Amino acid sequence: MCIGEIIMQAQRLNITLPYELARDFKRAVPAKKRSKFIAEAVKDKLAKTDLKDQLRKSAMAQVEIIKEIQEDFRYSDAEVDSRIP
């Protein structure tokens, strides 16, 4: 393994983009910087996707916790309601 492989192993991909997006990309990003640009964009998107998944799971867990709390206090709430004139 050489030094370059330790720093970054790369894999070539063949992707397809809509014509207008590919055109705009080629105009906006210099040829020698395109791979880095795409790598950073994909990395950012994956991080956001992972965050969305974590937030969704957290929200679902909180719903379950809230249901448990409501069940725990159901009888207390009924007792307080019965004391209200």
Image: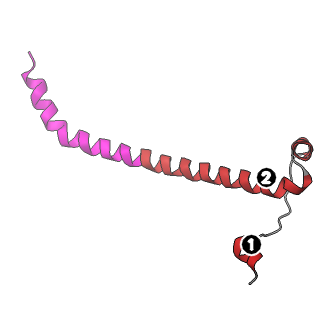
- Tell me the tag on residue 37: 2
Please tell me in which quadrant of the rendered image residue 73 appears.
top left
Q: What element carries label 2?
A: helix
Query: Residue flagged by tag 1: what amino acid is it?
Result: Gln
Query: Residue flagged by tag 2: what amino acid is it?
Result: Phe
Outermost residue, top direction? 85
Q: Report the Cα–Cα distance between label 1 and label 2.
A: 16 Å
| Front one among 69 and 2 | 2
Residue at 34% from the left image edge and 47% from the top image edge: 64
**Label 2 crowding class (10 Å Cα cut-off): few <14, some 14-19, many 20+?**
some
Label 1 with label 2: CB-CB less than 8 Å: no
Q: Give the range drawn in magenta.
A: 60-85
- Say whether disc 1 or disc 2 marks the residue closer to the N-terminus: 1
Give the dominant element type of the magenta stretch: helix, strand or loop. Answer: helix
Residue at 83% from the left image edge and 65% from the top image edge: 13
45 within the magenta span: no
Instruction: Classify the position of the C terminus by image quarter.
Output: top left
75 within the magenta span: yes
Residue 84, compared with residue 30, is above or below; it is above
| Front one among 40 and 19 | 40
On the rendered structure, is 75 left or right of 11?
A: left
Instruction: Classify the position of the N terminus by image quarter.
Output: bottom right
Residue annotated with mark 1: 9
